Image (spheres, rainbow, N blue to C red):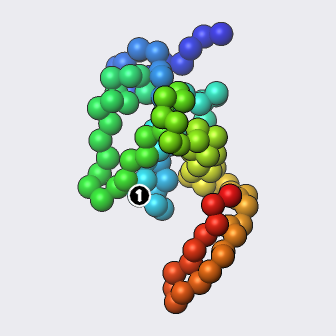
Amino acid sequence: MRSRSCSRTGCSVPAVATLTYAYADSTAVLGPLALRAEPGCYDLCAAHSAGLSVPRGWEVIRLPASDADPGHSTDDLLALAQAVRVAGSGGEVDLPAPAVTRRKGHLSVIADL
């Protein structure tokens, strides 16, 4: 199996991460290398993923490449990255409805599932 190269112009180093933009949310998601190349996603080498910068006002979500951080579930983070990829491509995202346990004005308390 041939590895994919970095998407940056002039860079032929093997890619280690995938970058996805959610333009409507002004968010960039940088996570582990996707299983396959997708339209609208950019594969980046280690140097370009480490030096990633986004426009002012945008948020960057960096997903861990391994289970090194036990405080976060990689399943949840990878599901979020996949949802952003689907939403960024104009597809429908099918997420479970959150369980609202209590409302106060416009604020809601969401149960941790």
For the N terminus, give its image quadrant. Answer: top right
Q: Residue 87 vs residue 48: left or right?
A: right
Q: Residue furthest bottom?
A: 105
Q: Position of residue 77 (x, y in %)?
A: 57, 44
Q: Residue furthest left?
A: 56
9 relative to 81, above or below: above
Residue lying at 34% horizontally and 55% vertically, measured from the top left: 58
Q: Is residue 19 visible?
A: no
Residue lying at 43% horizontally and 53% vertically, measured from the top left: 27
For the C terminus, give its image quadrant. Answer: bottom right
How packed mark 1 is, by other alpha carbons closer than 10 Å (few <14, some 14-19, many 20 or more), is some
Q: Is residue 58 visible?
A: yes
Closer to us: 64 or 112: 112
Closer to us: 10 or 100: 100
SS state under label 1: loop
What's under tag 1, amino acid-wise? Ser
Question: Quadrant location of residue 102?
Answer: bottom right
64 relative to 26, above or below: above
107 relative to 29, above or below: below
57 relative to 34, above or below: below
Q: Residue furthest top?
A: 1
Q: Position of residue 30 (x, y in %)?
A: 45, 38
Closer to us: 91 or 84: 84
Residue lying at 64% horizontally and 40% vertically, measured from the top left: 75
Question: Quadrant location of residue 93?
Answer: bottom right
Q: Position of residue 83 (x, y in %)?
A: 62, 50
The residue labelled by disc 1 is 26
Q: Position of residue 31 (x, y in %)?
A: 50, 35
Residue lying at 48% horizontally and 34% vertically, measured from the top left: 69
